[in-house]
Image (tube, rainbow, N blue to C red):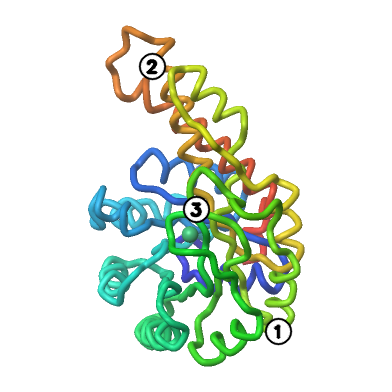
Amino acid sequence: MPLVSGRIIFDKANEFGFAVGAFNFSNLEFLKAILEAAEEEEAPVFVQTTEKAIRYAGIEYLSGMVHAVKDRYKIPFALHLDHGKSIDTVLLAIRHGYTSVMIDASDKPYEENVKITSEVVSLCAPLGISVEAELGNLEGEEAETRLADPEQAKDFLLRTGADALAPAVGTAHGILKLRERSEIDFERIKRTKELTNAPLVLHGASGVYKEYVEGINLYGGLVKEAKGIPDDQIKRAVEMGINKVNTDTDLRLAFTYALRKILAEEKSTIDPRKILKPAMEEVKEVVKRKIRLLRSSGKASLF
Ligand SMILES: [Zn+2]
């Protein structure tokens, strides 16, 4: 069971009360690291690309790579559009064989978010493509913080028919998580789950592990003001009802650390494969660590 609709993974994770890892990629090295880690852990997984990743690599490369290897793995995995900001991007993803999309109209007024998300659902549902939507605003690259209201989440899911919801619960994108609080708003997750019983998604969930930040700085980098979500908070968020956990920053940190280290240590090498291989291996290690943290190891057998 290789490339599947995100809905199949969302529903299984919701039914059995676990979370799957969702990892961002924009090149071969990340994609391969993610899929091989998931295969070794026998874990279902989302591989996802943002609009920026699409602009960087070209959607033909990104979806082409995934479709080329879809029969190479036994685990179920979905190709997901992360933070699609417009109907046009969603259509682009549909045309290129994405099996899941996120429409993020959370910066729009509520009624407009309902309208845009409903439109995306009406495009995707007949094709079996799952839709993740966002409510409230995450901190970081997006606008000012607005946490998601659980009652509104219920109304939103009823009216839009979205398969999964990413409620803003205090986390942030980028290298600095939990800007304004010391922990995730667990009660908000719990209440949203109670009212909706829908698959819930946690964004901005990287651990920003100290060893990588320090390692990067040790080898000539300059990463400051880094703060992640501790692993125990991720665990608790999953217990409260999170079913998909997005990780991007941690993969970037692992990759950059390994890259800086190899370039510093192997000064004579000019072979990109010798430079990128250790970085790919480091990304793979982080993906495995996350999969174990989410307890999705072995869950491929449920499909
Ligand atoms: Zn996000």
- Residue 303 in sight in this render: yes
Q: Secondary structure at mark 1?
A: helix
The residue labelled by disc 1 is 195
**Rendered position, 239 above or below 38:** below
Most distant residue in the bottom direction: 159
Which mark lies nearer to you, 1 or 3? 3
**Rendered position, 140 above or below 13:** above
Circle 1: residue type: Leu
- Residue at image position (38%, 56%) is 49
Q: Secondary structure at mark 3?
A: loop
Circle 3: residue type: His
Circle 2: residue type: Leu
Mark 1 or 3 closer to N-term?
3
The disc label shown at residue 230, or none:
none
Q: CA distance from mark 3 to mark 2?
A: 28 Å
Q: CA distance from mark 1 to mark 3?
A: 26 Å
Query: In the picture, residue 121 is in which quadrant?
Result: bottom left
- Residue at image position (24%, 54%) is 55
The residue labelled by disc 3 is 173
Q: Secondary structure at mark 2?
A: helix
Query: In the picture, residue 241 is in which quadrant?
Result: bottom right
- Provide residue 303's location: percent of width, then percent of height: 61, 66
Mark 1 or 2 closer to N-term?
1
- Residue 125 in sight in this render: no
191 horizontally vs 7: left or right: right
The disc label shown at residue 263, or none:
2
How crowded pointer 3 is (Cα within 10 Å; few <14, some 14-19, many 20+) is rated as: many
